[in-house]
């Protein structure tokens, strides 16, 4: 399994794209698709038309907005440029079908794509994509919003992605004994925020869950001014990496 960080920042950030991760197993999968991550996807050299599954954690714009650009491009490619692509499955939390129904009914041409598109709402039940096991888990982010973290298992390795999350038991369980956890490290420990983890909490989650390696991601601009690696390291003794765009990690 290979992870490439397409975006390690937030919605508007001077140097980092917003949330997006490319995961390669027996399938080519995206976790979230925030602004500027599509540009980074192109830089990876991966054929964007081979992506078969996009898994959304939630629909704050910083996790979602490049989907519109991506899908419009896929339509042009298949309709006018003679391109072919496999069916696309969009997976996400409660509200996924309602959102995409409205979007596709409103944006010109979106309902006439010449390839199959499937929408699937998931909660806390494992499912398979080929030989890849995906375990979504509801995490706590903002009030009244269904947000998911994802655990992906393939070839004897496990990866966890928090999506956006506060510190919660569910997140610790999601990350239980994974080889690599990518956590929402929006803020430094000294500038906590009620709906996101801070660096110290990322370290605590990693320790409690017994993760192998911790990647700190989803950094707000202010967070780059602090040593979040050191802050997370106060609780967690394992390897800690501050994520950056286009960083690739093999599991
Ligand atoms: Zn969010
Ligand atoms: Zn976010």
Image: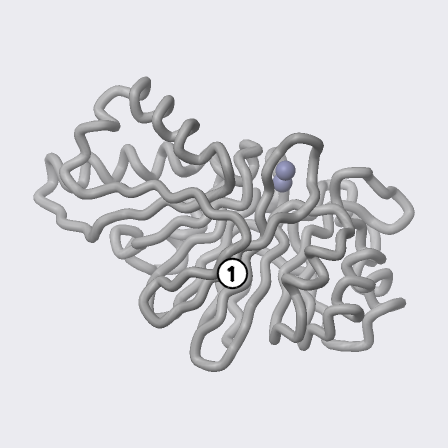
The crowding category of the residue bearing disc 1, from other C-alpha atoms within 10 Å (few below 14, some 14 to 19, many at least 20), is many
Could you tell me which quadrant the N terminus lies in?
bottom left
Is residue 229 shown left or right of residue 93?
Answer: right
Q: Residue at x 43, y 43 (%)?
A: 121
Comparing 200 with 210, the one in front is: 210
Spot occupied by residue 38 in the image (x, y as percentages of width and height): 41, 45
Q: Tag 1, which secondary structure?
A: strand
Image quadrant, ligand 1: top right
Say above or below: 14 vs 84: above
Q: Viewed as shown, does residue 58 lie left or right of 33?
A: right
Position in image of residue 139 (x %, y %): 66, 48
Residue positioned 37% across, 22% down in the render = 102
Farthest residue, direction front = 125
Residue 182 coordinates in the image, percent (x, y)? 63, 60
Q: Residue at x 38, y 44 (%)?
A: 120
What number of labels is visible?
A: 1
Task: Where is residue 244? Give x, y as percent.
Answer: 61, 57
Toward which corner of the image does residue 217 lie, by quadrant?
Answer: bottom right
- Say which quarter of the image contains residue 161: bottom right
> Does residue 13 appear anywhere in the picture?
no
Drawn side of residue 244 relative to residue 210, left or right: left
Depth check, front residue: 173 or 200: 173
Q: Quadrant of residue 47?
A: bottom left
Q: Is residue 38 visible?
A: yes
Q: Which residue is mark 1?
A: 135
Look at the picture and state if 99 lies above or below 30: above
Please determine whether, in this image, residue 5 is positioned above or below residue 74.
below
Q: Is disc 1's CB within 8 Å of ligand 1?
A: no
């Amino acid at each position: 399994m290979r992870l490439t960080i397409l975006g390690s920042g937030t919605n508007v950030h001077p140097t980092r794209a917003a949330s997006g991760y490319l995961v390669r197993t027996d399938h080519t999968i995206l976790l979230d698709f925030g602004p500027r991550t599509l540009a980074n996807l192109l830089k990876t050299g991966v054929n964007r038309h081979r992506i078969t599954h996009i898994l959304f954690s939630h629909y704050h714009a910083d996790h979602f907005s490049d989907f519109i650009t991506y899908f419009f491009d896929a339509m042009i490619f298949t309709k006018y440029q003679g391109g072919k692509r496999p069916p696309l499955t969009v997976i996400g939390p409660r509200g996924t079908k309602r959102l995409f129904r409205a979007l596709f009914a409103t944006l010109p041409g979106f309902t006439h794509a010449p390839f199959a598109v499937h929408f699937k709402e998931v909660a806390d039940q494992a499912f398979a994509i080929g030989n890849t096991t995906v375990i979504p888990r509801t995490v706590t982010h903002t009030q009244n919003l269904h947000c998911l973290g994802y655990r992906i298992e393939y070839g004897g390795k496990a990866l966890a992605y928090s999506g956006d999350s506060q510190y919660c038991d569910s997140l610790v369980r999601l990350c239980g004994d994974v080889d690599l956890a990518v956590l929402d490290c929006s803020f430094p420990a000294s500038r906590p925020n009620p709906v996101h983890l801070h660096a110290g909490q990322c370290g605590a989650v990693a320790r409690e869950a017994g993760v192998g390696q911790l990647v700190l991601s989803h950094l707000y601009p202010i967070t780059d001014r602090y040593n979040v690696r050191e802050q997370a390291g106060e609780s967690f003794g394992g390897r800690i990496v501050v994520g950056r765009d286009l960083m690739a990690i093999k599991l």
